[in-house]
Image (spheres, grey):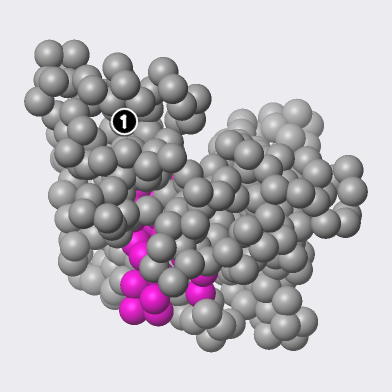
Amino acid sequence: MRDSFSLGRISGIRVGVNWTVLVFVALLAYGLAVGEFPAAAPRHPVAEYVAAAVVTAVAYMGSLLAHELAHSLVARRNGLQVEGITLWLLGGVSQLRGEVKDPGAEVRVAGVGPLVSLLLGGAFLLVACVVVVALAWLGGINVLLAVFNVIPAAPLDGGRLLRAVLWRITGDRLKAAVWSARSGQVFGWALVVVAAYLVLVRRDYSWLWFALLGWFLISAATSESQQAVIQSRLRTVPVRQIMTPDPVTVPASVTVAQFQADYLPRHRHSAFPVVADGRTVGLVTTHRINQVPTGERGQTTLGDVACPLSEVAQAAPDEPVADVLPRLNACSESRALVFTDGHLAGIVSPTDISRALERISRSPGPFASARR
């Protein structure tokens, strides 16, 4: 889910909102204003129900933000990089980069979200005794959110906890990830089947929401399973076997116009390491270059538009490809630069990784280097 607009930063963490949140908040506020609140507290003016419903819906999204913010802050304390938080139709997602170092860290990162939701739920329920029905709903929904999230099925937090336990038992992080993802697929299908039965046989259309949720869980769990399988296949393949050695470099001082006229026609690559004073300082791609307005290409240098080296995934030649995958990011368009003793030795592109997987699927044995 991509951000449609930004809410700013909290503790240095970017918080974005997908447009689907606006639809969800509107539908939730409508349901509370015409159903939940009038039934719980009848004979109040419509304006009061509407105001309470809007405040409650916004507060619920605030609860989800607190849940994801807890994940992000604890993840950052455990060595992961946090690119941001995105709120969307079904809740929120923390965009983390890297891998946790041990099962204990996995438990802390996965468990803090449900813990925060449980604490918020308890607080809302306590205050609800002396305030309004809206807080009681928030308390109940946060407790429900905490319980639902600890179900041992990926990509829920409980799936992360299950993965940590299996990781501890088997000592194999990738095998634990596969099993956790399969549990998510089983739970998602069970939710879809039960919801479909209740909708078709009992005519209880409120379960359509759960069928949709189950379908999203199946998709997310399948994606996690595929990612774990890919990492498992690539963990015995060193970077040197798939990288393009001695990549063509370009000076940081060259303008975009000069690059397009002198370099691009002679080299059929889509990414180039950028150097300055004999040092690699970043990576520029044809996509980033094409984003420069035509009128500014004569004054804009490659150093201005390159992804800085600090944001480019870096690897060693003997490092397993599977260990590099979590470090790939959007800035470098999923490419990594390979260094030996501080000197640029090669570059790895998504095409290199795809070709490696194709060769592994055809033959489990060693294979020759792939090109960009």
- The amino acid on which the numbered mark 1 sits, given as a three-letter code, is Arg
Judging depth in this view, the residue of 67 and 269 nearest the camera is 269
Q: Is residue 40 above or below residue 109?
A: above
Residue 146 percent coordinates (x, y)? 48, 67
Question: Is residue 85 found inside the magenta-colored segment of the image?
Answer: yes
How would you classify the magenta stretch by its main secondary structure? strand
Seen at 27% across and 55% down, the residue is 278
For residue 148, side relative to residue 37 (left or right): right
Neighbor class of circle 1 (other Cα within 10 Å; few <14, some 14-19, many 20+) is: some
Q: SS class of the residue under badge 1? A: helix
Image quadrant where one finds the C terminus:
top right
For residue 310, side relative to residue 248 (left or right): left
Q: Is residue 332 above or below residue 168?
A: above
Image quadrant where one finds the N terminus:
top left
Q: Which residue is mark 1?
A: 288
User: What are the residue bounds of the magenta stretch?
Assistant: 76-100
Judging depth in this view, the residue of 60 and 169 nearest the camera is 169
Residue 28 percent coordinates (x, y)? 36, 38
Residue 27 percent coordinates (x, y)? 37, 32
Judging depth in this view, the residue of 72 and 153 nearest the camera is 72
Question: Is residue 97 found inside the magenta-colored segment of the image?
Answer: yes
Residue 88 percent coordinates (x, y)? 39, 41
Seen at 46% across and 62% down, the residue is 339
Judging depth in this view, the residue of 219 and 61 nearest the camera is 219
Asked whether residue 350 appears in the rendered view, the answer is: yes
Seen at 37% across and 53% down, the residue is 312
Asked whether residue 180 appears in the rendered view, the answer is: no
Seen at 74% across and 65% down, the residue is 236
